[in-house]
Image (cartoon, rainbow, N blue to C red):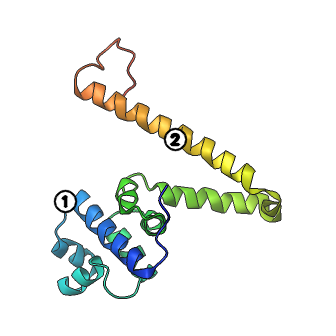
Amino acid sequence: MAAPPNDDAARRASLAKALKAIRRRRGLRAADAAEALGMPLRSYEHFEAGRGRLNLERVHLAADALDADPYAIMAALEIGSPEFAARCADNKLMTIYMMALQDFDDVAGDDIAQLDPRTLIAAFTRLFDQLAQEARARGQALEDWRSGRGGAGSGAADPT
């Protein structure tokens, strides 16, 4: 695993790549995104290029305008993977994660401090390994369906 970017310039570069990837995933031009955000095209281009200070409010506004996940965009900057923001644009993985985390905080409260790092690492590793396995299985089922190998009686999962 690569070290996450620890400087503002790297985060801004990741933001630029993430926003462009999401905009393209949505089939939008920069002018469309600027219009959705209610800002001049030049200002949007400046923002999308990662110029200027990192503005979390604007990240949330852009995510809303692009129907993306603002928490995935911010996480993408921290983990150095702009692709993560685009990968989560449709399923809103990080927003769901944040909601679950909020529930966990409400339920466990101060007892959270009793959890040691090894327990947390093991739990998150199991969770993410299971999710990766599920994602791969769904991807394979979809590929089988597209190629005609997932017909009736094949035992392949429904790709939807």
Which residue is at a point 55% across and 45% down the rendered structure image?
A: 128
Which residue is at a point 49% across and 55% down the rendered structure image?
A: 1
Picture quadrant where residue 57 is located: bottom left
Q: Position of residue 47 (x, y in %)?
A: 29, 81
Q: Position of residue 77 (x, y in %)?
A: 43, 69
The answer for how far apart the CA atoms under marks 2 and 1 are is 28 Å
Picture quadrant where residue 113 is located: bottom right
Which residue is at a point 31% across and 84% down the rendered structure image?
A: 51
Q: How crowded is mark 1: few (under 14 residues within 10 Å), some or many (20 or more)?
A: few
Residue mark closest to the camera, 2 vs 1: 2
Q: Nearer the viewer, residue 154 or 9?
A: 9
Q: Residue 69 carries which label?
A: none
User: Label 2's element?
Assistant: helix
**Can you say whether 58 is above or below 120 in the image?**
below
Q: Is residue 79 left or right of residue 17?
A: right
Q: Which of 39 and 42 is in front in this view?
A: 42
Which residue is at a point 28% across and 17% down the rendered structure image?
A: 151
Q: Where is residue 64 in the image (x, y as percent from the top left)?
A: 37, 69
Which quadrant does the C terminus fall into? Answer: top left
Identity of the amino acid at label 1? Gly
Q: Nearer the viewer, residue 129 or 32?
A: 129
**Can residue 160 be seen from the camera position used here?**
no
Q: Is residue 114 left or right of residue 145?
A: right
Q: Position of residue 69 (x, y in %)?
A: 42, 63
Extreme residue toward the front, this view? 2
**Can residue 96 be seen from the camera position used here?**
yes
Disc 2 target residue: 131
Pick whichever of labels 2 and 1 is earlier in the sequence.
Answer: 1
Identity of the amino acid at label 2? Leu
Disc 1 target residue: 27
Q: Residues within 10 Å of mark 2 (few under 14, many from 20)?
A: few
